[in-house]
Amino acid sequence: MLTLYGRATSSNVQAVIWAMNELGLTFDRRDVGGSFGGLDTPQFRAMNPHGRIPVLMHNDGLAIFESMAILRYLGAVFANAPFWPADPVARAQVDQWAEWAKMDVANNFTGPIFWRVVRTPPERHDHGAIRAAVDKFERELVSAERQLSSRDFLAGDELSLADIPLGHVLYRYFDIDIERRDFPALKAYYQRLTQRPAYRESVMISYESLRNTI
Ligand SMILES: N[C@@H](CCC(=O)N[C@@H](CS)C(=O)NCC(=O)O)C(=O)O
């Protein structure tokens, strides 16, 4: 049995929900974090000492925190190539893009851009900081644009674990009120993602409850 702890509006939770839906897994989800609270209880801290979501509980015994660790665990237990190949060389080719997408794409979006544009009230917007953050983020997207010019997905022609940390931030990137550079291959990739039921139901959900909350 799989139980996921985390509110559905958390981008890191969405990454895990999207992967589980792509893999056709059945799971329960408990709303914690944000306005639901519950991250400071001894029970939650026993699962994640950092008090953050997502946390995945497998078979009421194993609790895993950190979204990328959870994704790799799900890949190892429930998937194979092309999502998460067993062969170490093929897996490394997926993993190098997954690591880059989390560290250099997702981490340069959520706090630096989404929090500043959506979670911060407009009268406190720091337009210079927002522009600098978007420029930095888009410098990373240049690599994605180049990679996606010759294949349908980040690490090949089919969806893999590498697409999760890149793809889950794109809905908000393309939806929020900012000026964006033109990335034709990335835009076409995003359109392909929006055709996937798992992406629509896990990632393309309202973030209005997060507006002006910091
Ligand atoms: N590196 C962690 C980051 C986890 C994280 O920052 N989670 C946020 C939500 S996206 C959180 O727990 N925020 C507190 C809250 O929602 O109350 C991961 O990828 O899982």
Image (cartoon, rainbow, N blue to C red):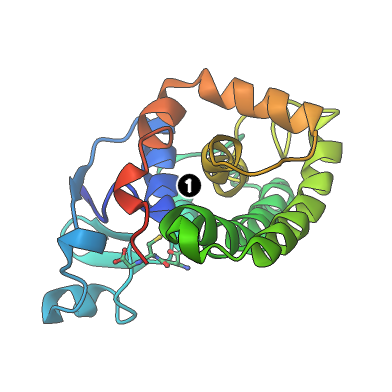
When asked about the image quadrant of residue 109, the answer is: bottom right
Q: Position of residue 178 (x, y in %)?
A: 63, 44
Disc 1 marks which residue?
Answer: 75
When asked about the image quadrant of residue 26, the answer is: top left
Q: Where is residue 30 in the image (x, y as percent from the top left)?
A: 17, 52
Q: Which of 132 and 56 is in front in this view?
A: 132
Q: Where is residue 192 in the image (x, y as percent from the top left)?
A: 61, 21
Q: Residue at x 57, y 41 (%)?
A: 177
Q: Can residue 1 be seen in this view?
A: no
Mark 1 Cα-neighbour bin, 10 Å: few <14, some 14–19, many ≥20: many
The type of residue carrying mark 1 is Gly
Q: Where is residue 22 in the image (x, y as percent from the top left)?
A: 43, 31
- In-image side of 194 versus 36 (left or right): right
Q: Quadrant of the C terminus?
A: bottom left
- In-image side of 58 versus 42 (left or right): right
Locate ligand 1 by image quadrant. bottom left
Q: Which residue is drawn at 67% across and 67% down?
A: 129
Residue sitting at the far top: 195
Q: Is residue 167 visible?
A: yes
- Count of picture labels: 1
Element assignment for label 1: helix
Cβ(mark 1) to ligand 1 < 8 Å? Answer: no
Above or below — where is 12 with respect to 205? Answer: below
- In-image side of 70 versus 147 (left or right): left
Above or below — where is 85 with respect to 6? Answer: above
When asked about the image quadrant of residue 43, the answer is: bottom left
Q: Which residue is drawn at 53% across and 23% down?
A: 194
Q: Which residue is drawn at 42% across and 37% down?
A: 203
Q: Nearer the viewer, residue 172 or 83?
A: 172
